[in-house]
Image (spheres, rainbow, N blue to C red):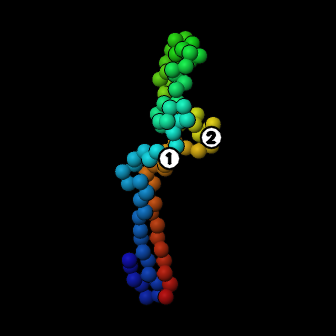
Amino acid sequence: MFYFSRFNVKFYTHILNVLNTKNIINVFQNTGTDDDDSFLSLPIASQYVNGVDGFEAFYRTINLANGWSYMKATGTNLWGPPRQIRFGIMVEFN
């Protein structure tokens, strides 16, 4: 805190989720986990996995690692917020 004749200035930092951990807040209903929605194990998925090069890697990246399909289907996320760092200045007048 810095003191001046008519006001004080305080600089601060507020960090949320310092370690940037994946805090699970929801899971897929079919599997009860946050990293497998069971689609790739369904018979219908085999036509995409076998017929399209890179489909499985693409599906895992978009829908499982990032939770995109869960977000689109439910409107909520699988995990809590990532690390957030906020800086601020507070000015107090005397």
Taking depth in this image into account, of 91 and 22 the one nearest to the observer is: 22
Question: Which residue is at 49% across, 18% downward?
Answer: 54
The total of numbered circles placed on residues is 2
Instruction: Name the mark on residue 25.
Output: 1
Q: What is the CA distance from the residue labelled 1 to the residue labelled 2?
A: 13 Å
- Determine crowd level at label 2: few under 14, some 14-19, many 20+ residues with C-alpha closer than 10 A: few
Asked if residue 37 is positioned above or below residue 82 in the image, the reply reads above
Percent across and percent down for residue 72 are 62, 37
- Determine crowd level at label 1: few under 14, some 14-19, many 20+ residues with C-alpha closer than 10 A: few
Quadrant housing residue 2: bottom left
SS of the residue at dot 2?
helix
Labels 1 and 2: the sequence-earlier one: 1
Question: Which residue is at 43% across, 63% downward?
Answer: 14
Percent across and percent down for residue 8 are 44, 81
Task: Specify whether residue 48 is in view.
Answer: no
Decide if residue 21 is on the left or right side of residue 75: left
What kind of residue is marked 1?
Answer: Ile
Percent across and percent down for residue 13 are 41, 64
Q: Which residue is mark 2?
A: 74
Asked if residue 52 is positioned above or below residue 18 in the image, the reply reads above
